[in-house]
Image (spheres, rainbow, N blue to C red):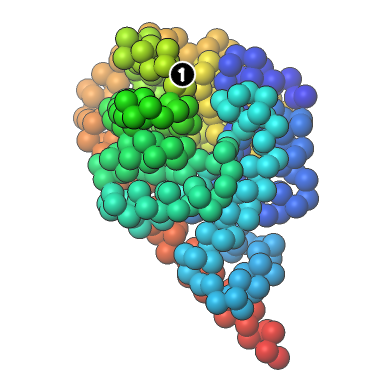
């Protein structure tokens, strides 16, 4: 077991992989990460799948087979994605069982084109959850204004949810509120309150957005400050009377997950966000490059302070140079949703191209 990644685990933080490809499933890489690097779950998104299909041939045979069966577009993609993610879920199933369902999860995102359509998101989440037929697979829904009621309804329906595209304390609290309402409704209806959920806060995109105006002493600190502020809100919620009542009824907390933790600044330490955001009862999902860097030379120090540390001081510094963190959070969420939609369109286009190429090749 790698001592650096094991240290995060000992702090009470779960280390997940922000990647899924058929290659790492079939060549044993994911199994090795689980065995050697303390990886206990993974996340995926349209960009990850688009890159995987575009930059290799591991999906060609499956795409050709499914196309010949008459599948195309989103239907074909979700069949591919479920093939990968159910296999990954099975690899993580021992972790899921050993932790009583706290860890060992994988995630599948609903179509990003549904980000503004509550009703269709609810139906898509239910359909994908049923198709996966795995207890340790999250359906990922964005924490947008239209996504929040879909999250509540899905939790009430017993569908485990990964809330994505959260960029601020307020975004997190809105997502947590949707989760709590869904659980409260389940308890009132006499249903099992144990429905898994994570709330994914995106970190490094903050620093990319302000790199040209950040005060020198706070370069690459805005994302961490927002995360620290959010972590305080998370700990406060878990200590609240409202949550304690649900916990006493058997509910499990919606865990806070750090997303976008790969360092984007080439002049910064490549393990910057992982080291800064070590904290109990959280998850850090990281790309393979960051995972390898942290395993090689990462050094997590003290855990995040539950009182938010110097987060407000740092945020005030950014405010003095004209950064409105609430407005920027809203902009980052919109841009994130747009980016996933563009990746989704590119993904479907790539699948169409592959299907045509494979059909042409087979007819020769």
Where does the image place residue 256, in percent across and percent down from the top left? 45, 26
Camera sees residue 173: yes
Q: Residues within 10 Å of mark 1 (few under 14, many from 20)?
A: few
Using residue 309 as the reference point, say whether residue 265 is left or right of it.
Answer: right
Q: Residue furthest bottom?
A: 364
The residue to which callout 1 is attached is 250
- Figure label count: 1
Q: Nearer the viewer, residue 181 or 209?
A: 181
Q: Residue at x 73, y 20 (%)?
A: 3
Instruction: Place residue 55 in its image quadrant.
Output: bottom right
Where does the image place residue 36, in percent across and percent down from the top left? 76, 30
- Position of the C terminus, as image quadrant, is bottom right
Q: Residue furthest front?
A: 190
Q: Residue at x 35, y 57 (%)?
A: 113
Where does the image place residue 338, in percent across and percent down from the top left? 34, 53
Residue 3 sits above or below residue 49 on the image: above
Where does the image place residue 330, in percent across and percent down from the top left? 26, 39
- Position of the N terminus, as image quadrant, is top right
Q: Nearer the viewer, residue 330 or 117?
A: 117
Using residue 207 as the reference point, say whether residue 40 is left or right of it.
Answer: right
Q: Residue at x 68, y 42 (%)?
A: 90
Q: Residue at x 71, y 54 (%)?
A: 23
Residue 46 sits above or below residue 346 on the image: above
Using residue 343 as the reference point, say whether residue 94 is left or right of it.
Answer: right
Instruction: Place residue 88 in its image quadrant.
Output: top right
Camera sees residue 183: no
Instruction: Place residue 344 in its image quadrant.
Output: bottom left
The secondary element bearing badge 1 is classed as loop
């Amino acid at each position: 077991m790698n001592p650096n990644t094991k240290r995060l685990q000992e702090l009470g933080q779960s280390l997940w992989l922000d990647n899924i490809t058929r290659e790492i499933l079939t060549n044993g890489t994911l199994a090795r990460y689980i065995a050697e690097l303390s990886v206990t779950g993974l996340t995926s998104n349209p960009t990850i799948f688009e890159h995987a299909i575009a930059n290799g041939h591991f999906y060609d045979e499956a795409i050709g087979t499914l196309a010949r069966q008459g599948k195309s577009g989103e239907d074909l993609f979700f069949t591919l994605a479920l093939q990968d993610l159910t296999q990954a879920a099975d690899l993580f199933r021992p972790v899921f069982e050993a932790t009583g369902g706290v860890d060992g999860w994988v995630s599948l995102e609903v179509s990003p084109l549904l980000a503004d359509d509550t009703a269709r998101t609810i139906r898509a989440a239910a359909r994908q959850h049923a198709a996966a037929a795995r207890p340790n697979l999250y359906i990922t829904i964005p924490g947008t204004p239209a996504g929040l009621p879909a999250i509540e309804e899905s939790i009430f329906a017993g569908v485990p949810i990964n809330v994505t595209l959260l960029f601020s304390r307020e975004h997190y609290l809105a997502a947590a509120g949707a989760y709590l309402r869904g659980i409260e409704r389940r308890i009132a209806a006499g249903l099992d309150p144990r429905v898994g959920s994570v709330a994914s806060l995106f970190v490094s995109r903050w620093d990319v957005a302000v790199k040209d105006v950040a005060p020198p002493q706070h370069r690459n600190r805005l994302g961490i400050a927002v995360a620290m502020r959010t972590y305080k809100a998370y700990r406060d919620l878990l200590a609240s009377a409202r949550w304690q009542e649900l916990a006493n009824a058997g509910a499990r907390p919606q865990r806070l997950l750090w997303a976008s933790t790969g360092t984007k600044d080439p002049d910064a330490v490549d393990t910057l966000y992982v080291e800064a955001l070590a904290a109990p009862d959280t998850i850090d999902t990281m790309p393979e490059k960051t995972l390898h860097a942290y395993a090689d030379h990462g050094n997590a120090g003290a855990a995040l302070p539950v009182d938010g540390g110097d987060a407000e001081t740092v945020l005030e510094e950014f405010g003095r140079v004209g950064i409105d963190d609430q407005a920027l959070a809203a902009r980052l969420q919109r841009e994130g949703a747009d980016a996933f939609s563009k990746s989704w369109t590119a993904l479907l286009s790539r699948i169409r191209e592959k299907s045509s190429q494979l059909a042409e090749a087979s007819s020769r």
